[in-house]
Amino acid sequence: MESRCVVLDIGGVLEMTPPTGWDVAWEQRLGLAPGSMHQRLGGVWDAGSTGAITEHEVRARVAADLGLGPAQTEALMADLWDEYLGSPNEELIDHVRTLASRCRLGILSNSFVGAREREEKLYGFGDLVDDIVYSHEIGICKPEAGAFEVTCARLGVKPADCLFIDDFAVNVTAAEAAGMRGLLFESNARTIKGIETHLTHRCGQ
């Protein structure tokens, strides 16, 4: 028996996260060459995305790598989270709320250590879906196949019964390779139509 499922990304889908320019501003403030801050902190960002380090360790490494004091470190991290969290995509969130009786609902997000607590406080995603799979909690990032496998297993569904929605084509392609249906997020209208098509058509149609 089919158990239809819709799985959504967060950043760029459920949250609107346009660039705020925080990184450029900090490079200018610290006298760093354009793009060099992320080069220095690339290992920190990668480790935070897979939960290999704690939030405390993130702050310590950011401070050490950039030569910041405690107040500067907190200010930089606040600016990072401001862009990361963005603003809620209310129209899509409202539509997803109507789907609970029609299908299983999940979130699969490439995330950063500390994201669950902040997003739950701001947006209450835990009440929106049946389960949230964060990369920093499972140690696997999209587009790795394991991320999709873990998501299906935790939701108790078959990949073929799942529609996965993401704003990055590489992740949509990876979901399809894992046996899911994929939908690239381009607009709320197209996404809502795609969800409705998925829920009203039998698998294979």
Image (tube, helix red, strand yellow):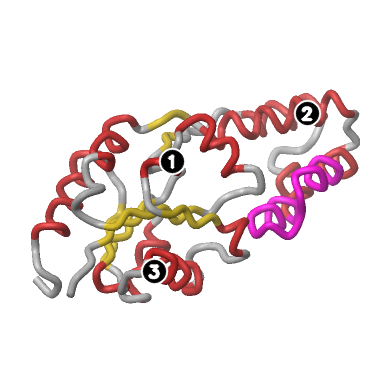
- Decide which of 123, 168 is in the foreground and name it: 123
Residue plotted at (90% across, 42% down): 64
Magenta segment: does it hold 46? yes
Between 175 and 19, the one nearer to me in the picture: 175
How many residues crowd around disc 3 within 10 Å: few (fewer than 14), some, or many (20 or more)? Answer: many
Residue at 42 percent of width and 34 percent of height: 16
Left of 140 or right of it: where is 181? left
What type is the residue that disc 2 sits on?
Glu
Dot 3 corresponds to which residue? Answer: 152
Tell me the chief SS of the magenta region.
helix
Tell me, yes or no, whether the two marked residues, 3 and 1, touch with CB atoms within 8 Å: no
Q: Residues within 10 Å of mark 2 (few under 14, many from 20)?
A: some
- Is 31 on the left-hand or right-hand side of 173? right
Q: Quadrant of residue 60?
A: top right
Measured Cα–Cα span from mark 3 to mark 1: 18 Å
Q: Position of residue 89 (x, y in %)?
A: 35, 33
| Amino acid at dot 1 | Phe
Q: Which image quadrant: the N terminus? A: bottom left
| Residue identified by numbered label 2 | 74
> Residue 120 at what x, y percent from top left?
52, 37
Q: Residue 190: horizontal and vertical position, in percent?
A: 19, 45
Determine whether 44 is above or below 174 in the image.
Answer: above
Category of crowding for the residue at label 1, using alpha-carbon neighbours closer than 10 angstroms: few (below 14), some (14–19), many (at least 20): some
Q: Residue at x 64, y 55 (%)?
A: 49
| Secondary structure type for disc 1 | helix
Q: Quadrant of residue 2?
A: bottom left
Q: Mark 1 or mark 2: name the one nearer the start of the chain.
A: 2
Closer to the camera in the image, 133 or 1: 1
Q: Which residues are magenta?
A: 43-61
Nearer mark to the viewer, of 1 and 2:
1
Give residue 125's mark: 1
Which element type, helix, strand or loop, lies under badge 3?
A: helix
